Image (cartoon, grey):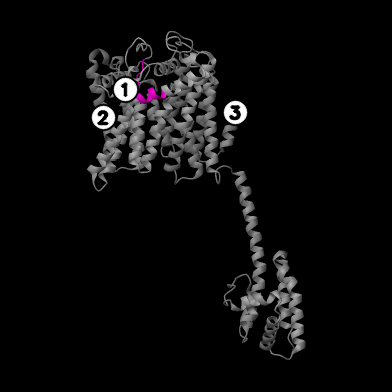
Amino acid sequence: MQSSSSSSSSSVSSCLPCLKTSTAEGKQKEVRADSHSNTFLASSSPSDSPSTGVKKNVDAASSCDNCDLQKLAAAAADASCDILKPIDDDKEMLQSETDVSRTPNWRSQRSTSAFMTLLTRRSAIGTKKKKKQMQKKMEQAFVWPWNSHKWATFLAISMFAFLLRMLVALHSYSGAAVPPKYGDYEAQRHWMEITVHTPVKQWYQNTTDNDLRYWGLDYPPLTAYQSFVHGIFLNAVEPAAVALHTSRGYENTSSKLLMRWTVLSSDILVFFPAVLVFVALYYRQHANQEQAWALAMILLQPALMLIDHGHFQYNCISLGLAVGAAAAVIMRQELMACILFSLSLNHKQMSTYYAPAFFAHLLGRCFQCRSPVVGVMRLGVMVLATFAVCWWPFLSSWHSVLQVLSRLAPLERGLYEDYVANFWCSTSLLIKWKQVFSIPMLARLAMGMTIGASLPSMVQQILAPSAQGFLFSMLNSSFAFYLFAFQVHEKSVLLPVLPATLLALNEPQVLQYIVPIAGYSKRYFLYHAKKINFKVNELQFLLLGELIKLLESHGSFSLPFVMKVMV
């Protein structure tokens, strides 16, 4: 018996090195582990029965206090008989375990052998997992950035859109060096001059320092505040650019560069973040690649770039606030939507094109509440509070309010512009609207037709408000205003184009037609610019066409490939 114990101890000691190295040897070491386990079991005397031999070996292992195998064998003996589940591709092991289980002490024998096999198999499984992880990393490196770098993709698209805006801003603008009014660049610069050097109450009044006939302010107070902030910046860097009375027609290179950066910074601070939030919310159920296309459709829209960075305006602020309000509607943050849309209205009155959609949708949400009256009152108070803050300097007298309102609705300009192809301009070939009807009559007629065209989508949103229905309502109401409203400006085409781009993945065919037409119509501004490089304009249309093709194919090409083609 002692010889049997000593032989079993020597067997155990000889088995330990193999046990320690089994995890690092792989599948080839599994055979060695099985052979050692057989040696361990066969180390008992031949005269003993199998159950006696197993019992002796276990007793011998427990007598060794300093042996690592004692702990392993004890833990394996306490484990259930289901340490290893049956595996289809290892029938031999299952058969051997079944035979051993018939012995009285089958648990110790099966647990020891199973534990050693489990170690080797875990090593093999770990190696396979590492190989799969490396393979995934290699695949992601080749398909970047669609799978695992969503926000890096958004950043790349945003930087590319910013680059295109800089390319447009490098060239001239309509009205440059053309007296007496020098184009919209001079209008923006003059508003900075007036807001910096005159009191707030005189911004919309005709005074000796503020001649309303020379680019008088004709936008709501938030535009005046924006001009004031930018004017302080210009006055600190180059005071001559906004000097009172003496800066008219000031077109120094440095001042134009500063003015261009005010537009670019407004785009980055207002429009870009609003679009990013909207895409992340509205298209959150779509794949990352589709979200990237949606972002590209909105940021790379050429008409906005040509008007703001070529013709020189700040439409990105009012449109960015409107997009932010739409994102708040999607989040079901009605109060925030009221604030943002009210700010958009107070920046440019053109945002009224979206008013029917916001009014109908928010009213429909209020009807879904437990107390609709309370919901309507909360939204109404928020709108009034926002308007009160924006109009506070002009609320001192009723005359000041009327003075501002008269500048916002210049009826004397007429029903339409000669180069805006809306309903009134197109039908004037058959009916001379301006000659047959008076201006007040035309204003009422235009209002009635605009409301009538917006009414179907409004009713739908009041009865069944939804996020997608709200965006379609924005598209419908903005088209209604563009076609039938009074005094439609040439840049008003940006209003229906925005919801069309927001619905790029839902209605790609609408986007395919309206965006190129809107962008091409802005060439009017470029024809009046001196030293303009038309390659920039052609670049935008080429980019837009390629992106629409990619949108239709949903990933047949890669974005880096398109960028390479554009360059």
Badge nearest the viewer, 3 or 1: 3
Q: Residue 423 — which label? A: 1
Please provide percent x and percent y for residue 107.
61, 81
Q: Dot 3: within a 10 Å radius of its alpha carbon, few (fewer than 14), some, or many (20 or more) residues?
A: few
State which tag comes first along the sequence, 3 or 1. Answer: 1
Q: Please, which residue is most extreme toward the top here?
A: 180
Residue 276 visible in rendering: yes
Residue drawn at the location 25% of the way across and 25% of the way down = 447
Q: Quadrant of residue 75?
A: bottom right
* Mark 2 to mark 3 CA distance (whole Å): 46 Å
Residue 92 visible in rendering: no
| Residue range corresponding to the magenta coloring | 216-226
* Residue 383 highlighted magenta (yes or no): no
The front one of 513 and 161 is 161
Residue drawn at the location 50% of the way across and 22% of the way down = 260
* Mark 2 to mark 1 CA distance (whole Å): 15 Å
Q: Residue 451 — which label? A: 2
Could you tell me if the residues under marks 2 and 1 are in contact, i.e. CB atoms within 8 Å?
A: no
Please tell me whether mark 3 sits on a helix, a strand or a loop: loop
The front one of 202 and 18 is 202
State which tag comes first along the sequence, 2 or 3. Answer: 2
* Residue 225 highlighted magenta (yes or no): yes
